Image: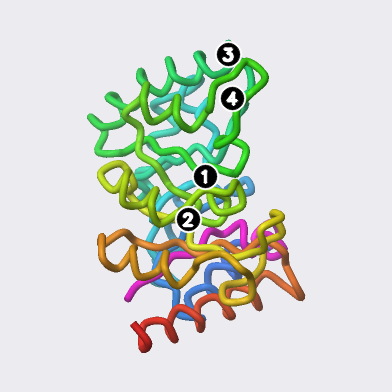
Amino acid sequence: MDYGLQLYSIRDITKDDLEGALAQTAEIGYTYVEFAGFFGHPADEVAAMLEKTGLKTWGTHSDWRDLVKNFEETVAYHKTIGNKNFIVPGTDLWTRDKMDEFIAYANELQPILTKEGMTCGFHNHSREFYDTEEVYIPFQELVEKTNIKLELDTYWAYAAKEDPVAFMEKYKDRIHFIHIKDGDADGNGKPLGLGTAPVVQVYKKARELGIPMVVESETLTPSGIHEARVCFEYLKKLEKDY
């Protein structure tokens, strides 16, 4: 099995040494990465880092406004680093005006990205599953009023008292990959295997549906690379057990 790492997990390294962070990620055994910023590096430098480490780009967490402001330059950057999945890591959806604005742009951007061989996706946190003050649920608005792909963060769904496995089944045609994560029911993240989220059930469902899994571990305890290694070793153990 191949697994990806969301590089926010090792943000204690990437901000100062992106190439070193990629090298350590590859050394653990991850085969692809999801970027969370490029820290001023030109696209050709990032592409060279990836080639040197043997890693592939699976996606990026990027600001959708970059596409609005400078579509051609943004797409060119992503193509240079081999990225086909432009993922919005979260945005202001908490008023009707902001929600409608994002829906309009998502519906505009998705088809033109498709023509470029790319997808537009959205990564959830827990807040998107709750009613806003104007009485709508942002996640429901996204799935009903757009065709963008979903990167289901299974832990944040769990923290919102939702069943991530049921969501995976329900939206299997929209989910292009998941964040496999762990933590407690109160929103405190932990490395895989150390929390109460249904990680094993999520893992089995992802295997059943053929959904790629991207690891994210957020607490840098004692370091991001330590947590990334714990998560990878846990997944390799699940491979043997299931």
Q: Let me know if residue 62 is in the magenta part.
A: no
Q: Residue at x 31, y 30 (%)?
A: 113
Badge 2 density bin: few <14, some 14–19, many ≥20, Cα 10 Å: many
Residue picked out by circle 1: 61
The residue at which mark 4 appears reads as 93
The span from disc 3 to disc 4 (Cα, nearest Å) is: 7 Å
Which quadrant of the figure has residue 3? bottom left
Q: Amino acid at mark 1?
A: His
Work out whether residue 27 can be spotted: no
Q: Earlier in the sequence, mark 2 or mark 1?
A: 2
Task: Give the residue type at disc 4.
Answer: Leu
Between the residue at mark 2 and the residue at mark 4, the CA separation in whole angstroms equals 23 Å
Please name the residue that numbered disc 3 is placed on.
96
- Contact (Cβ within 8 Å) of mark 2 with mark 3: no
Depicted 75 relative to depicted 144: above or below: below
**Mark 2 or mark 4, earlier in chain:** 2
- Estimate the spatial distance between the alpha carbons at disc 3 and disc 1, rounded to whole Å: 24 Å
Q: Indicate the secondary structure of the residue bearing disc 4.
A: loop
Q: Nearer the viewer, mark 4 or mark 1?
A: 4
Start and end of the magenta stretch? 1-16
- Give the distance between the C-alpha atoms of the residues marked 2 and 3, in whole angstroms: 30 Å
Q: Please, is residue 150 above or below residue 109 in the view? A: below
Q: Is residue 2 magenta?
A: yes
x, y (%) of residue 18?
A: 60, 61
Category of crowding for the residue at label 4, using alpha-carbon neighbours closer than 10 angstroms: few (below 14), some (14–19), many (at least 20): many
Which badge, 2 or 3, is on the more N-terminal residue?
2
